[in-house]
Image (cartoon, grey):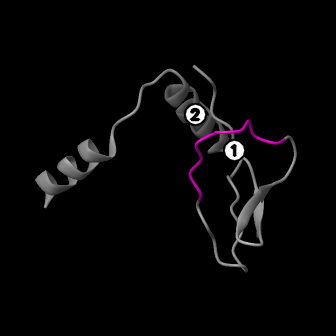
Amino acid sequence: MLGMKVATGTVVDGKVVVRGEPLPEGTVVTVLAREASERFEVPAELEPELLASLAEADRGETVSADEVLARLRRIN
């Protein structure tokens, strides 16, 4: 299983251009778009939690979107 990567990019001519090392052809990505004036920063105290979560995803320890939605429906 391949690991997760966090990459930053910019939309150019309608396509996301990733900074740094290019991703392999066919890589499936999730794009979170922020407002132009917004920044995404992980506070130093939360970085270990983020890295642990990425490691869980690498191991396949994930919850499907269907399961998340089902849990939310049970709460409401």
Whether residue 59 sits left or right of residue 41 in the image: it is: left
The amino acid beneath tag 2 is Leu
Residue 6's disc is 1
* Residue in the picture at 21% in, 54% down: 72
Q: Magenta segment: does it hold 44?
A: no
* Residue in the picture at 76% in, 55% down: 8
Residue at the extreme right of the image, as rendered: 20
Structural crowding at the residue carrying mark 2, measured as other residues with C-alpha within 10 Å and reported as few (<14), some (14–19) or many (≥20): some
Task: Pick whichever of labels 1 and 2 is earlier in the sequence.
Answer: 1
Residue 73 point in image, percent of width and height = 15, 56
The amino acid beneath tag 1 is Val
Residue 62 appears in which quarter of the rendering?
top left
Locate the C terminus by quadrant.
bottom left
Locate the N terminus by quadrant.
top right
Whether residue 21 sits left or right of residue 7 in the image: it is: right
* Residue in the picture at 57% in, 26% down: 55
- In the structure shown, which secondary structural element does the residue marked by tag 2 occupy? helix
